[in-house]
Amino acid sequence: MIHERDSDPAFIAGISQPVIYPITLVRIDWPGELLNLHTGAGTVTFDGEDFTGTLVNGENLGVLQFPNEAAGLRGQEMSLTLYGEYSQLLDRVNPLATGRKVTVWAGVTTEPGGNVLVGDPELVFVGAISGDLVSPPTSGAIAALMLRVKSGTHARVRGSITHSDEDQQSNYPGDTYFERTARATAYRSAPPKW
C-alpha cells in the first residue's frame, strides 16, 4: 500500500490491521452552533471536541455519501443526510447555512462501534454547504434533511483562458495572426459600403 500523506503513525498501523473498525467524523459549521457528528454510537473525542454518534438505539440517523479521492481540476461533491422528526428537521433548515464549512475525517476505533480512536483520523474532505433539502416522511414519522456539500469550484469557474498578441509573439516572432484577426473582426462588425 502506498500512502502519500503525512499521517499519524498510529492511524496507519490501525488501518494496516487485518480487521479494522472504521468511523467517519463530520464537523459542520452550522449557523449559531458547531455540529460534531460521527457514524457510530455514543461520544468520540477528537481535536479537543466531542462528536455525537448518529447511531441511536440501533438506528442510523445519519448517512454520508462522498466521492472517491481524486486529483484534478474538477470540484468534488458529497451529501450528508440526517434523519429525524419532520418538524425538528424543518426547524434546522437555515438559508444562512449555504457556504458554511464542512470537514470530514476517516478514522479507526479499537472495537466495533467503539468510542476510542486509534491515532488521529485522516482528513478526507473539506467543503462548503451548497444547499439543503428537507424531505417529508414517506413512511412512519421519519423525515430526511439532505445537505449538499461541494469542495470548491471547478477549474472552469476559477480560471480564464487568454491568449494575447504578446503570447503569440513570444512563441512565434513576427507572426501577424492577431493583426489579421483584428482586421477580420472589424470588417465583420462594420463591412465597407460600396
Image: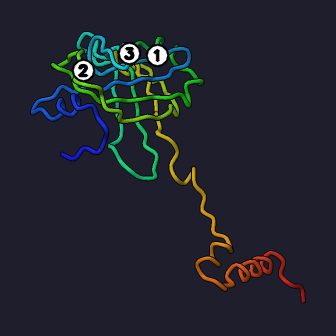
What's under tag 1, amino acid-wise? Leu
Q: Is residue 8 left or right of residue 17?
A: right
Q: Depth check: give the residue in front, 1 or 22.
A: 1
What residue is disc 3 on? 48
**Mark found first going from the N terminus, 2 or 1:** 1
State how far apart marks 2 and 1 are (Cα): 30 Å
Q: Is residue 160 above or below residue 67?
A: below
Q: Is residue 2 above or below residue 144?
A: below
Q: Is residue 129 left or right of residue 57?
A: right
Foreground mark, 1 or 3?
3
Foreground mark, 2 or 1?
2
Q: Quadrant of the C terminus?
A: bottom right
What's under tag 2, amino acid-wise? Leu
Which residue lies most toward the left here?
Answer: 18
What residue is disc 1 on? 89
Circles 1 and 3: CB atoms closer than 8 Å: no
**Mark found first going from the N terminus, 2 or 3:** 3
Res 138 → quadrant: top left
Q: Is residue 156 above or below residue 95?
A: below
